[in-house]
Image (cartoon, rainbow, N blue to C red):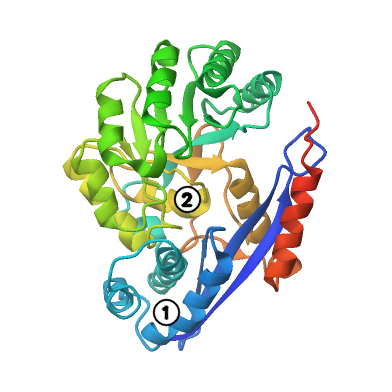
Amino acid sequence: MKIEKITASIHQFPVFLPMIDKPMEQRVLTFCEVETDEGLTGHGVTGAFLPWAQVAAIEHDIFPTIKGMDPRDTEAIHKAVWWKVNPRAYTGVVSNALSAIDIACWDIHGKATGRTVAQLMGGHRDWASTYITFGYPFFDIDQLCEYAKKFVAEGNTRLKMVVANDKGGWREDARRIRAVRDAVGPDVDIMIDANYRFTPIDAKMLCRAVEDCDLTWFEEPLHQNDARAMADLRRGTNIPIAAGQMEGHRWRIRELVENQAVDVLQPNCCYNGGFTESLKAAHLAQTYNLPIANGGGWPIFNMHTMAGVMNGWLVEFHWGMWQAGQKFFTGAPAPENDRVKIPDAPGLGFTPNYDALADCRVTSPEKLMAAGMQTNEAGGITKV
């Protein structure tokens, strides 16, 4: 079996939250499809960062490098890309582009063998535990509590909210966290995510203010995932620290682990080089008795990692990417009572909805920018 063709395209659509009448964001993804000479096709996605560069890297740099290779030989594919396209171990565009291709190759491998990707990765189980990212920074405290109670009522007992975006600083974050804890009670897990935004001192102040709130983890608290500073923060708080979703290769992941900077490692197959690199991160974490969990969304892809390995833990159903999965892929599963079931079909277990992809395809940077500007102008989100 040989790789015969690889295509990539950019897609965008507005994401609506229940009970809110304006889009909360314009979700952008890069879709990739790998075709073989034997008729099997696989697909993958990556994120919204520099999408036009991702498409160029996939079609004009990586495809010529791996054309004619067997898609099941993922180690050989990674070696070819590393030495011909990425010899100095850069992250970013190359890692993202390789992620989409690698996911598609594992999809093909699963279809060729009649096994799910989770089974190919180790087959630990056919399900993964889930959590819901619900707490957006544009919500006021009343909306936060309303949405938290809504998702709990639907059977979800693990919730994540964003911090480090409020003009009131860490003190306002502390008030918001306490309000959510009071709203959902003591038996619901609450995670917080700063998306790299805090300085070490602000992160310490927030930790000190909410340590009695029984948080499950504090995700990516510091600028640039500074391993040294996160290790210092971790030693000074009883709140577990989580990070790793945007790290583009195993050496950055290793830095977090060896510096004892994290309690939970978060490899994301859509950004770090695909399932091939995520499996390496999972095995590294195993040797240090660390769990891995999904941060950065794209649950229907990352669920295979979390189900496949024995230290796989939680899959993030981030609302925007959750809705993207439902919109663009037929047969994409959803969480139910804190779990997501891996589909029985081989490979990824779901298929592209080509009509939906075509309707949302963006063909020029100008159109993508125009849509983004429209979203910003619409910005006044109405209250629940």
According to the picture, the residue beneath numbered tag 2 turns out to be 342
Residue 4: x and y in percent read 46, 88
According to the picture, the residue beneath numbered tag 1 turns out to be 62
Please tell me which residue is depicted at 58% across the width and 44% down the height of the picture: 334
Q: Is residue 191 above or below residue 176?
A: below
Q: Secondary structure at mark 1?
A: helix
Q: Earlier in the sequence, mark 1 or mark 2?
A: 1
For the C terminus, give its image quadrant. Answer: top right
Amino acid type, mark 2: Ile
Please tell me which residue is depicted at 72% across the width and 38% down the height of the picture: 17
Residue 82: x and y in percent read 30, 73
Q: Is residue 243 visible?
A: yes
Please tell me which residue is depicted at 32% across the width and 62% down the height of the picture: 276
In the rendering, which numbered label is found on residue 101? none
Please tell me which residue is depicted at 54% across the width and 59% down the height of the picture: 49
Q: Is residue 121 visible?
A: no
Of the two numbered discs 1 and 2 in the rendering, the one whose residue sits closer to the viewer: 1
Q: Could you say which is closer to the camera, residue 124 or residue 217? A: 217
For the N terminus, give its image quadrant. Answer: bottom left
Residue 180: x and y in percent read 58, 17
Contact check, label 1 and label 2, Cβ < 8 Å: no
Direction from residue 295 to residue 51 in the image, left or right: right
Residue 255: x and y in percent read 23, 47
Amino acid type, mark 1: Ile
Label 1 vs label 2: CA separation? 30 Å
Q: Is residue 180 above or below residue 81?
A: above
Q: Indicate the quadrant where residue 185 lies.
A: top right
- Callout 2: few (<14), some (14-19), or many (20+) C-alpha neighbours within 10 Å? many
